[in-house]
Image (cartoon, rainbow, N blue to C red):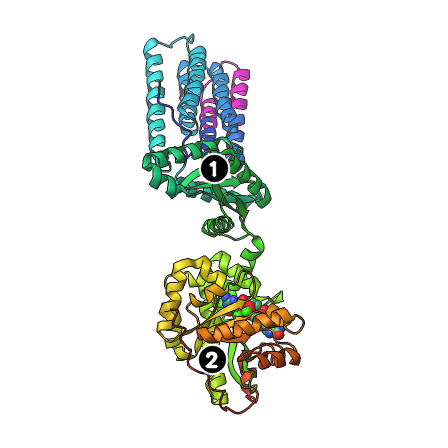
Amino acid sequence: MPAPRPAPTVATPRVMGPTAGAFYLAGGGSALAVVLGSPFPSASAQAQLGALATTALLAGAALLLRGHLLPRWAFHVVVGLGTALITLAVPHCPSIATALAISTVYLFVAVDVVFFFTWRQSLAHLTALAAAAAGVLGDRPGMTPGVAVALGAVLVVVSTVVGILVQRASSAGRDSLTGLANRRGFDDALDGALAVAERTGVPLSAALLDVDHFKRVNDRSGHAAGDDLLRAVGEECRRALPPGAVLARYGGDEFAVLLPGAAGPAALEAVERLRTAGSRAGLSCGVAELLPGESGADLMRRADSALYAAKAAGRGRARLADDASAVLARDLADALAAGDVRAWFQPIVDLADGAVVGVEALARWTHPVRGQVPPLEFVHAAETTGLVRELGQAVLADACRGALAVRRAWDRDLVLTVNVSGRELACRDYPERVLEVLAETGFPAASLVLEVTESVVDASGQAALTALRALRAHGIGVAIDDFGTGYSAFSRLDTLPADYLKLDAVFTADITTSPRRAGMLEALLSLSDALGLRVIAEGVETPEQARLLTGMGCPLAQGWLFSRPVPPHELAARVPGRPAGRAAAPREHQRTGAA
Ligand code: C2E
Ligand code: CA
Ligand code: CA
């Protein structure tokens, strides 16, 4: 009994269809040669063999053109039909020579069988084939035991050799631990599915599944326990797999699923079933649906981003990559390449005398169809698609050039503040890239301030703190952005390496109506002073807010009262406000001593 063997991974409908088609055409052609090139005792036998040959030729053409669209099970019918056609053809052959010639076509069927199916299924098909051949040839005059053995031997040897070779070829795409497809097998299946999706327009989705806290299992219970867990998870998922889906071990503790025919929501549902089918471990899953024109790598990258989001949201859940972001990100990539994402400036003023002492760079992008896109939207799109490095670098460089132009036009120093996203800050080479931009543009490090939020620093962990400290060592300042929203904590103020504290607009808006808020602000101002942090109040819209802030001793502010964000050349053309007096030149960033 041959060893159990899964159906070969190389045998996908994309390969099976044309293979079966070619064999049908060759078989039909052989029969036609017999019909046209042999003397027949009766015209009706000749006509019937001709009809069978034509059937085989038509089936071959159909398989060649459309066979790749057939479901796997349909190939059992294809193979069975092949056996039936040959078995019907042989009795019409006028001589033993022509009967043997047609019988060699059984070989085509045998090769199909071992190529397409598991050993067990192959054995069933081959047994039926051998019985049919024996039945139809056995009592023919001129048939001897020697000929039967020779014919049988050729059949057995060819099908065994082809079966083994196919198995060899397939094992390259298989993971030895779980028996599932490996990454290579998955990529092959993905290529095939992409071609089908492109041709037919049928949806295609992919998912990445990650075993939660796998490292902990490995560390605590050893690698054997880890392997057991992976095998169990693979098996549980395989059982819950919808028909037509491909499951693979993608690497480490990550599995991948290919879902041909499933649009995003249906794919999410299917993956949710896989996730809840497993009892052995929690799974985090990211799902993405193929977008028009997208490559397999793009699709998997978006599934990976969705997986990241699922993990960030607390693991043990499935997330669907959002298409809107992906579409926007593609346009954003073009805009970045064309230099269409620009830095606009909102002035930061000294409340004591109204002089502009700095500018905050705010990214601006006018989409060719949508018009102005809110920066929060395209920053999010960039973060979820790996574009954030390019975006950050483009805005920083443009901001440095713009700020230099305003400084030259006004003939005074100005601080430039630039927003930094969390994913950007977590990049290993972030500090080097900032320094590169400064070197390229010639903007002085001592006049640059990077704005980060507390939550960004917390989420990015130690890497973010290290990057900020490295940048401060070069004289670059750090501002804590949006303070007073979320879980801003006073206690964090002395541990963050910062020079400025930016008070969120929501906080500013309340000070004129809430005496408690006003009291908190006064306390915060004196605390910041003690810590060497300069406070910038954001979102100042009314003279009353400005008056109150000035009265409390808030040093700096920005908001629509002073100016909306404007392009650098527009700011450069303005009269710079009060001449550079005592407060116009920015102070060097003060050190909090908390680096
Ligand atoms: P943010 O850093 O808090 O920026 C301040 C936002 O408040 C800006 O919105 C600004 O236009 C708006 N603003 C200014 N003065 C007033 C005012 O008086 N009243 C009100 N209601 N709003 C005011 P914007 O430009 O839409 O930017 C939104 C957010 O997008 C920014 O919030 C920042 O988090 C992010 N962002 C903008 N540019 C970049 C960038 O280059 N990189 C990154 N990572 N994020 C950016
Ligand atoms: Ca900001
Ligand atoms: Ca802010």
Q: Residue 39, how many percent across, how many down?
A: 46, 18
Label 2, label 1: how far apart the Cα atoms are: 55 Å
Ranked by sequence position, the earlier of labels 2 and 1 is: 1
Q: What element carries label 2?
A: strand
Q: Main secondary structure of the magenta part?
A: helix
Residue 94 % position (x, y): 46, 15
Determine whether 408 is above or below 322 in the image.
below
In-image side of 379 versus 438 (left or right): right
Marker disc for residue 142: none
Would the CB of label 2 be found within 8 Å of ligand 2? no
Residue shown at 39%/59% (left/top)?
462
Q: Is residue 365 visible?
A: no
Q: Give the range drawn in magenta.
A: 28-54
The residue at label 1 has a CB less than 8 Å from ligand 1: no
Q: Which amino acid does label 2 sit on?
A: Val
Of 175 and 11, which appears nearest the observer? Answer: 175
Q: Quadrant of residue 400?
A: bottom left
Few, some or many residues within 10 Å of mark 2 (<14, 14–19, 20+):
many
Placement of the C terminus among the 4 image quadrants: bottom left
Task: Please identify, in this view, whether the residue under mark 2 or under mark 1 is nearer the observer.
Answer: 2
Residue 47 lies in the magenta-colored region: yes
- Determine which residue is flagged by label 2: 415
Viewer-closest of 49 and 410: 410
> In the image, ligand 1 is in what quadrant?
bottom right
Above or below 138: residue 429: below
Q: Which mark is residue 246?
A: 1
Q: In this view, does 278 lie above or below 323?
A: above
Q: Is residue 377 magenta?
A: no
* Residue under the point 50% across and 44% down: 206
- In the rendered image, residue 68, in percent from the top left (x then y), is placed at 51, 36
